[in-house]
Image: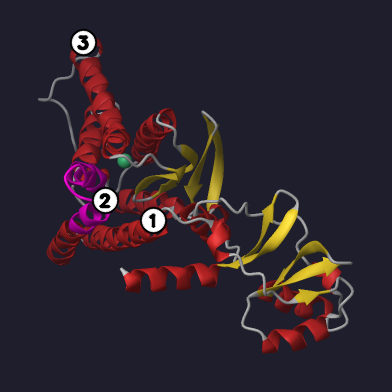
Amino acid sequence: MQSRYSLNLGKIFGIRVSVHWSFSLLIAWIVIISVNQGLSAIQILMHILFVLSLFVCVVLHELGHSLIAIRLGGEVSSISLLPIGGMAHMAKMPESPREEFLVSAAGPLVNVIIAALLWLYMLFLHPVSFDDMSFESINLANFPLMLMAANLFIVVFNLIPAFPMDGGRLFRSALSVRMGRLKATRIAKDIGQVFAILFIISGLFFNPFLVIIGFFILLGAKGEYEMIKYQDIFSNHNAAELVNDKYVVLDPETRLSEAAEKLVHISDNGFVVKQEGDFAGILTKNDLITGLNNLGKDGLVEQIMQKDVYRIPPDKALFELYQHMQKNRQHYLPVFDDDNFLGVIDLENIHEFFLIHKALK
Ligand SMILES: [Zn+2]
């Protein structure tokens, strides 16, 4: 999820934690349901407190994944919370089957530990009697028990062998030992889709929430497989192979109307701006259209060109580059060997490269 839809909560171990705006809908939903049930303000507050505690457990779960991933050489940029659960965004993910297994197992393990601690708390520090416990709403007496049950539910739910749940990854890592990662992912994806359909069908009869989870799994399974397909095709290729040195050059003083004129005749997604033969920046199609809207046709290229743009090193692994461009929505970037400008790479060319190599396989 993009951060502009999220509220930043701060950093833990250098990892940014944010919560998606739709999380407020979940809280609102709980309040509405509680009011409808005729609960008191205190009881409603307990329900909200419970959900917040649960989401602390979810953050700890994601931290479990993240810290193990970092230990194994991965990079985690952020953790985001959605009403449906948490998500750790890994810029670099350990890929060997063993490492993937450890990273995937770490999350659910955190919830097992939390559940065990709550159980010990109830056993020794705060013994509870189930006989006079009321389960109509969450209260101080049943809070630890309910939180323990919820953590166990998170464990069971995450162990469903389907992407994007941890179980999907655990399953894939187990399969990857015997076959290639691509094939393992395909099998895990197929099994995930069967689960998704079961969720959707049973959801239609029992609980609409299951339908949502079903679609979530369907999308997750497809997304994961697509990504691994790209990773498979792009492995052992780097940026140097895709450098385009037949770009169209503009002068910083070119008027936007003139640039727009040129744009009609080219298939590239942008221009290279050069000043006296030296690289000065890039101008993408989108920059130009926005610039025309804001400055009019008499605006100049230098007013809107991107000067401090990311410079791709030629040895950049193609899959990493592809992820970088996708994530940052940069469709057109320059390639530099140190200070030496080599050309540009267009995201569309990366897609074409993928399609051609896929067809050749
Ligand atoms: Zn997890």
Residue, x 69% and y 55% (percent of image)? 336
**Disc 3, disc 2: CB below 8 Å?**
no
Q: Residue 199: x percent and y percent?
A: 17, 60
Q: Kindly report the distance in space between the C-alpha atoms of the residues bearing marks 3 and 2.
A: 46 Å
Q: Sort mark 1 into few (<14), some (14-19) or many (20+) by Cα contacts within 10 Å.
A: some
Q: Nearer the viewer, residue 57 or 262?
A: 262
Q: Kindly report the distance in space between the C-alpha atoms of the residues bearing marks 3 and 1.
A: 51 Å
What stretch of residues is rendered in magenta?
A: 167-188
Q: Nearer the viewer, residue 82 or 53?
A: 82
The residue pinned by badge 2 equals 181
Q: Quadrant of residue 335?
A: bottom right
Residue, x 18% and y 46% (percent of image)? 175
Q: Amino acid at mark 1?
A: Gln
Q: Quadrant of residue 106?
A: top left
Q: Is residue 340 visible?
A: yes
Quarter of image, ligand 1: top left
Identify the main secondary structure in magenta. helix
N-terminal of the pair, mark 3 or mark 1, is: 3
Q: Quadrant of the C terminus?
A: bottom left
Q: Nearer the viewer, mark 3 or mark 1?
A: 1
Q: Is ligand 1 less than 8 Å from the beta carbon at label 3?
A: no
The residue pinned by badge 3 equals 124
Q: Amino acid at mark 2?
A: Arg
What residue occupies the far left of the structure in this picture? 131
